[in-house]
Image (tube, helix red, strand yellow):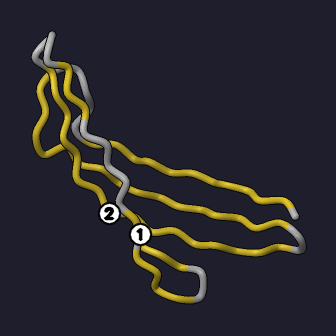
Amino acid sequence: MWQLGKGTYLRSASIWAFDLKNHMFHVPFSIGIGKIVKVNNTVFNLFVEPQYSFIHQGIQPQVQLFAGINLQFN
């Protein structure tokens, strides 16, 4: 994570997966952007992160879109 200021940040949360028994693997690269916003007493954390698998073998997708919304209620 890299803070850009005013609640905006860059992120990269790729997870490498290896299935040695079945000779399958998935090594993605990703970079995404997120934003923290407070509305009344609720804090919203919104992000989107495209992931491209530059090394893969098996049934894993080559391109993915990882997105999420986290809410914190005060």
Instruction: Name the spot of residue 54 as percent of width and height, x first.
Output: 12, 46
Instruction: Name the spot of residue 60 as percent of width and height, x first.
Output: 25, 27
Q: Amino acid at mark 2?
A: Ile
Total residue callouts: 2
Kindly state the secondary structure of the residue where label 2 is placed.
Answer: loop
Q: Is residue 2 above or below residue 27?
A: below
Q: Is residue 5 above or below residue 64?
A: below
Q: Earlier in the sequence, mark 1 or mark 2?
A: 1
Q: Is residue 31 above or below residue 21?
A: below
Instruction: Name the spot of residue 19 as percent of width and height, x first.
Output: 20, 20
Residue 43 sits in which quadrant?
Answer: bottom right
The front one of 42 and 61 is 42
At horizontal 18% and vertical 41% (from top left) the residue drawn is 27
Disc 1 or disc 2, which is closer to the eye?
Answer: 1
Answer with left or right where residue 2 lies relative to residue 46: left
Q: Which residue is mark 2?
A: 31
Q: Residue furthest top?
A: 21
Answer with left or right where residue 17 lies relative to residue 40: left
Kindly state the secondary structure of the residue where label 1 is placed.
Answer: loop
Q: Residue 1's mark? A: 1
Residue 73 sits in which quadrant?
Answer: bottom right
